[in-house]
Amino acid sequence: MATDYDAPRRNEVDDLAEDSLEELKARRAETQSSKIDVDDADLEPTELPGADLSNEELTVQVVPKQSDEFTCSNCFLVHHRSRLARESKGQLICRDCAA
């Protein structure tokens, strides 16, 4: 189909002004679909907030803070000493929080 690029452009406002109420209702019915698109990832069970997790067991191994690590006094994350930006008045600050 050939396109006439010299013809004046029409926008949706012009189209809506000229359409009758019946045409608008028909278009609306066409665009609405009763079929729901379900993704396989949506079928996985999800945990609800406030769910009872008392029977769950910890599946990761917790390692205590090592001698070459520090806890940032701003974000409270444990970092390696190489991530230390500054230390002032006993407070250790990581590079992320110092930036």
Image: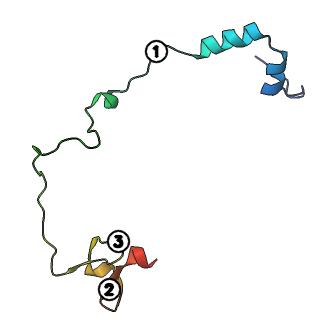
On screen, residue 46 versus residue 26, left or right, reads left
On screen, residue 87 versus residue 28, left or right, reads left
Q: Which one is closest to the eye, mark 1 or mark 3?
A: 3
Q: Does the CB distance between marks 1 and 2 fall below 8 Å? A: no
Circle 1 SS class: loop
Place residue 49 in its image quadrant.
top left
On screen, residue 51 versus residue 35, left or right, reads left
Mark 3 or mark 2: name the one nearer the start of the chain: 3
Place residue 28 in its image quadrant.
top right
Mark 1 or mark 3: name the one nearer the start of the chain: 1
63 vs 10, nearest the viewer: 63
Q: Which mark is residue 75?
A: 3
User: Which residue type does callout 3 highlight?
Assistant: Cys
Residues packed near mark 1 inside 10 Å, few (<14), some (14 to 19) or many (20 plus): few
Give the alpha-carbon distance from disc 1 to disc 2, as whole Å. 58 Å
User: Which residue type does callout 2 highlight?
Assistant: Gln
Number of labels in the image equals 3
From the top left corner, tell me how far across and down residue 32 is, in percent: 57, 16
User: Which residue type does callout 1 highlight?
Assistant: Lys
